[in-house]
Image (tube, grey):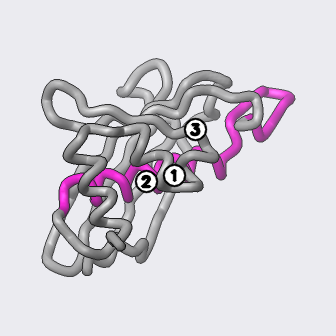
């Protein structure tokens, strides 16, 4: 029986983005999508769903939905670029909310700030209309096996 990372790598090599999301229950629950852009970077998308609203008065996306989307994006990004038999483990995830998430599609992109043999540091930025006006930014540290 193949390990999860072996199945992930098969899906990655086939370019089966939807298959990768289907293999991650929380990402599937949130409705995360992603694709590889022409420059090789991954762009993560969270299409708007009414169930994602946390404050119906504004209305605004739930902070937990935003954070979960961003952490999933970071983990997928890390697994996408690594050849490893074990998935990374989250050590720390620090999130700064900069503005309310409107009831609209949310996008995210991840950038490595440092990747060593045992630890990877990453910055995640989420936005809606304008990438230069982020809804939230996060810093994450992962243990690599």
User: Element at badge 3?
Assistant: loop
Task: Find the magenta span and give its range.
Answer: 53-82
Q: Is residue 130 above or below residue 7?
A: above
Q: CA distance from mark 1 to mark 3?
A: 22 Å
Residue drawn 38% across the image and 35% down it? 34
Do labels 2 and 1 touch, CB within 8 Å?
Answer: yes
Residue drawn 32% across the image and 57% down it? 8
Q: Find residue 96 and name its label.
A: 1
User: Element at badge 1?
Assistant: strand
Give the residue furthest to the front: 1
Q: Find residue 138 and name its label.
A: 2
Q: Looking at the image, which is closer to me, 137 or 62?
A: 62
Question: What is the tally of numbered marks visible in this picture?
Answer: 3
Do labels 1 and 3 touch, CB within 8 Å?
Answer: no
Closest to the camera, between mark 1 and mark 3, is 3
Closest to the camera, between mark 2 and mark 1, is 2
Q: CA distance from mark 2 to mark 1?
A: 6 Å
């Amino acid at each position: 029986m193949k390990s999860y990372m072996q199945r992930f790598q098969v899906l990655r090599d086939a370019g089966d983005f939807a298959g990768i999301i289907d293999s991650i229950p929380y990402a599937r629950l949130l409705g995360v999508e992603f694709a590889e852009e022409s420059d090789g970077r991954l762009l993560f998308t969270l299409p708007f769903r009414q169930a994602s609203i946390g404050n119906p008065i504004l209305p605004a996306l739930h902070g937990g939905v935003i954070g979960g989307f961003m952490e999933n994006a970071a983990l997928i990004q890390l697994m996408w670029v690594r050849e490893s038999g074990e998935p990374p483990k989250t050590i720390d995830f620090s999130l700064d909310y900069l503005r309310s998430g409107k009831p609209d599609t949310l996008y995210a992109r991840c950038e490595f700030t440092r990747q060593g043999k045992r630890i990877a540091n990453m910055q995640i930025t989420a936005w809606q209309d304008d990438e230069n006006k982020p809804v939230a930014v996060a810093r994450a540290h992962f243990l690599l096996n």
